[in-house]
Amino acid sequence: MASHSAATKDIDGMKKRPKRKADSQVNSSSQHHKQAKTKDGDNRADTYNYSVIDRPVTFSTLPPQVHRLIFTYIEDIEDVFRLGLANRYFWSIGRERMHDYYSSFLGRWANENIVCVGEDVKPGGYPPGLFSAAELDVLRQKTSDIPYDWDDDLGMPFANEPFTLHHFTFPSISATEQDICLSSKSWALVGHLSDLGMSKDPAFGCTCSEMLVKEEIYFPQDQQWILRNLTTKQFVRSEAIALKPGFIHGPSISVLGFGEVAMSRICWSTSSFTSMSDTANISRGVWAGHRLDITTLARHRDETNEVGWSDVSGQMAREIAVIWESEYGADWRETLCNR
């Protein structure tokens, strides 16, 4: 009888429980069943039901970790703004997601094999290590209807032309990456959102200035920046190559900077002919096909502890000096600074 009454009581309790609420809420309940034992060790059938009151969980009351995870799964940046403008709390997360979105357009060539190829490169002329042996076998058999030298035969295409490294520069073979200005992109996005009617939302007006970004905010100028060769584990410090300390603006260096350093070492061509006065063989760059990136010295030390890395700043400064002095003479530094 005790067993029957306990079971009946439990069923009645189930009938009295509230119905499931709206889809925006999730009911969480738990039951703890406790069985008492008799003196002879038999389990009693009496089950004591400790029912916890249903606790509704809404979208707003989810943990911050879940909210951040949800924002990361929103692919359309417009939807990030729409959800972020719901309140100040969601905007704090949406703003983080916005900066992740804009920073994804930076450093797109970082850690990629990079080479500046000349148009006179001959078939089979590839920088060491750029392609695997299997890839080279495929390239040797590959042909194109675009001649490797457009000066021959007035640039008329011929079928079955041997494929060269220079063919990768043609739009019909490789996609051309668009140059993106973050300032212009953010202005265009804000204008688009305004056209959609979001400018009528007071929250839009309060956060509009935060939606407009510049590249400088992602490149702190109070830190030391370096150019790294990830293939050879070498790096170059900004202050070693800048003509003046005032020319350094984070990773951007006026007049002569990391771009010039990279170009002096990543050029590749079969022909040694150049329009430069320097006699160095710049057309066979020792970094051609290597993986490069630009980062802060502090981040580099945190990531690597500088184990196995070498600072080649002095060597690069001397090489750059030889190249520019051959063009502008002994006073090349003053000449460049006054241009």
Image (cartoon, grey):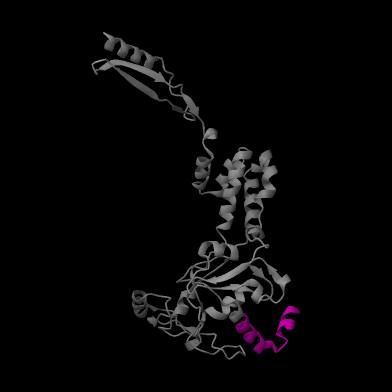
Choose top left, top right, bottom left or bottom right for residue 9: top left
Residue extending farthest to the front is: 39
- Nearest the eye: 134 or 53: 53
- Nearest the eye: 291 or 47: 47
Magenta segment range?
317-339
- Name the quadrant of the N terminus: top left
Please report the residue visible at 59 percent of the width from the left and 50 percent of the height from the top: 98
Residue 338 sits inside the magenta stretch: yes
- Please state the horizontal and vertical placement of residue 241, each as a whole percent of the image: 65, 76
Residue extending farthest to the right is: 338
Please report the residue visible at 50 percent of the width from the left and 40 percent of the height from the top: 66
- Number of numbered discs on residues: 0
332 vs 101, left or right, is: right
- Please state the horizontal and vertical placement of residue 180, each as a whole percent of the image: 60, 62
Residue 211 visible, this angle: yes
Residue 170 visible, this angle: no
Q: Is residue 114 positioned above or below 182 on the image?
A: below
Q: Is residue 4 positioned above or below 303 on the image?
A: above
Residue 289 sits inside the magenta stretch: no
Choose top left, top right, bottom left or bottom right for residue 273: bottom right
Q: Is residue 295 positioned above or below 49 on the image?
A: below
- Name the quadrant of the C terminus: bottom right
199 vs 159, left or right, is: right
Q: Main secondary structure of the magenta part?
A: helix
- Please state the horizontal and vertical placement of residue 309, each as a whole percent of the image: 51, 72
Please report the residue visible at 27 percent of the width from the left and 12 percent of the height from the top: 3
- Please state the horizontal and vertical placement of residue 142, each as a whole percent of the image: 36, 77
